[in-house]
Every structure is written in C-alpha cells, then in structure tokens.
Image: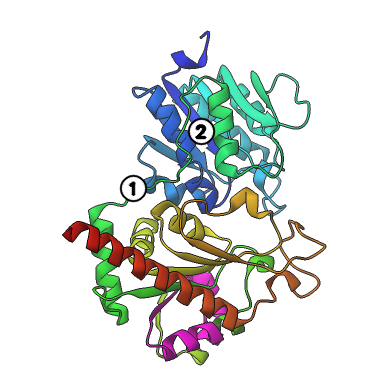
Amino acid sequence: MSGWMEARNILAVRQDNLGDVVMLGPALRAVKRTLPHARLTLLASPGGAAAAPLLPWLDDVIGWRSLWQDLGHLPFDPPREHALIERLAECHFDAALIFTSFGQSPHVAGYVCYLAGIPLRAGESKEFGGACLTTTLRSAPDAIHQVDRNLGLVEALGFAEGDRRLAILIADSARRAALDLLRATGIDPEQPFVLLHPGASAQARRYPPERFGVVARRLCQRGVQLLITAVEREVALIEPIRRAAPRASFLIGQTSLPEYAALVERAALVICNNTLPMHLADALERPLVCLFAGTELESQWRPRFAPARLLRRPTACQPCYLFECPIGQPCLDISPDEVVEAAEELIEQATLRMRHTSDLAVK
C-alpha cells in the first residue's frame, strides 16, 4: 500500500476515558468524510468503548485494557499481549491512527500494530520511537485543545479538514428511555430541569460533595427541578447531597451512555466537574456550569460551543495533572453561592434566547 488515501480498513486507537473518546468524534468524522467506503474500527478501553454508539462514523469497536495505558494494576501476563496482537492481525487492517493526549506516547501502540501486520501507522510524538510509526507528526503545543490535536493528526495525513464541533448521535430509543427514567425519578420532562453530576474519575477533579449538597439544596429551595446523577461506584459522593437536598431526584446507574446523553440533551442546565457530562453538554450545546479543577489547562479540554461558565481559583500549582490533591484542592475553593449564581445566570440567558427565537418565528 502506498498511501493513506488507499486505506479501506482503518483502526483508530484511543485508550482513555469516555470523554476522550467523545472528543475523538471530529477526527473520525473527517476520516469518514474523506474515505466514506473505508471501514473504521475503534480500539478503546472497556470503559471508553461504551461511547461507540454515540459516534456514527464507527463501524466496529474493540474493547481492550491495554498495558501501555495501565497504572500498574494489570498482572504480568505476556500471553495476554500476544492475544491482542493476534486479534488485531485477524482483522487485516490497512492502517492505524494512534490518538494520544499531550503526555502520552504512541510508540508502544505503534509497535503492537506493527507486530499485527498493519503497514501504515501514524501518531503524534515528542520522543524518538524508531520505526514503530510510519508517520510521526511532531508534537503540537501542550496547551492545544484535544479535539484540535486529534484533527491535526488526520489532517496532516491528507484527510479533509474537519469541523471542530463535537457531535454525537442519540437514537430515538434512547430518547424514549430517558423520558421514562425522568418520570420514574419524579422529574416532569415537560418542564425545565437541571442535571447535576458530582463525580469524576479522579479525586483531584471533584468539587467537594458537601458543597455540591449546598448547591443542590439552594436550587431546590428556588423551585428548580433537580436531577442528581452518578454511576454506582459514586454512591458515597451522593450521600451528602441526598442529606442536604432530599427533594432532589436521584439517578444512580440505570442508564446506558446513549440514554444518559439523552438526559443531558433535555436538561435546561448541566452542573458538573471536568468529566464526561461536560463533553456531552458541549456536543449538545447545553448550558453548562463546570467546576474545572487546576489539574489540567482549560485550553486542553474546555467546552467550546456550549454556553458555559468554568469556575476555578487560580493557583501556583496548576496544571498539576494529579489524580489526588495533597493540599486540599485550593483550585476548587468555590462557594456554593457562586455556583448557584452562575447557574441562574445561564438559565436566564437560555430563557431569553428561547423567547427571542420564538418571537422571530412568530414574525
């Protein structure tokens, strides 16, 4: 094979969390727009693979917990790695696009793809990796947004310049299921509601749940329909909120990712940390208040098209890129009153936009 434009069976590698896979959408869209008849498969972590139904440009997904993204929890098991190579070899891929964040290396994944017989392998890298990649794109600045980083790789290979907006596909069945879930929790889906998600994969990125509890109580006192969401492992985060705001509705687990995206789509406002709901709200252009910790630069991950307020205190240690904060999260020392004020401002702005749109339609 002489070049990327001849590829007909392409592997996209992204071994991170759900939000990272959602942000891969514009690059996948650019590949499919350029090569509409090519088959596009995603190699993702088991968690990240759940995002595949939201990305209509994918034809298939392989969920695999990869050694090169592991934090030291996988056992020493070389045959397991050989099994991945064999599985990829059975698919007879023509090319592999290896997507990484600013701090990750594509070379281990590139070597796995080489051993699997994939002739074209491209990634972005700061370091020398020999011939693991056939195309190595010089690393972009660390501060670049992840969507632009992903698109930079595929555009450098000759794929069509991509739309920078996030986009996801939500099936009608997921929208119907979301309506049923809202009614089951006591939320009237015909009236505005706020979705509050207190979780995040890293402790350092979580606004304190006790403060989220105060936010929830004050919103409920203002007559806001409030839906608190969490995954099952986040039950402990929910309890302070449940005690502070018993009038709120709670949804713990019980949803597929498409159903959860449909809940975000219907919400008048989303309140969350720097985590998946932030990216879903950006893709769906829903108003958003984000408690954005100093663990990362805002320019790397922030929402860009949704009406959004990002709340954070400047600190000398940002960005720290830590999973656990050793000094008490001064970057998230935001008062609940400030969160509620930002929420009310965005709700009011959204209401005014709706009225303006309605007035234009009447005229």
Q: Nearer the viewer, residue 161 or 6?
A: 161
- 154 drawn magenta: no
Q: Residue drawn at (53%, 71%), measured in percent from left and top?
A: 233
Which amino acid type is marked by label 1? Leu
* Image: magenta residue range: 213-241
Which amino acid type is marked by label 2? Ala
Picture disc at residue 169: 1
Q: Nearer the viewer, residue 254 or 149?
A: 149
Q: Residue drawn at (75%, 73%), measured in percent from left and top?
A: 330
Q: Residues within 10 Å of mark 2 (few under 14, many from 20)?
A: many
Q: Residue drawn at (35%, 61%), measured in percent from left and top?
A: 265
Q: Is residue 191 above or below residue 274?
A: below
First in sequence: mark 2 vs mark 1? 2
List the single residue furthest toward the front. Answer: 363
* Magenta: main secondary structure: helix
Q: Is residue 253 above or below residue 17?
A: below
- 218 drawn magenta: yes
Residue 334 seen in the current view: yes
Q: Residues within 10 Å of mark 1 (few under 14, many from 20)?
A: some
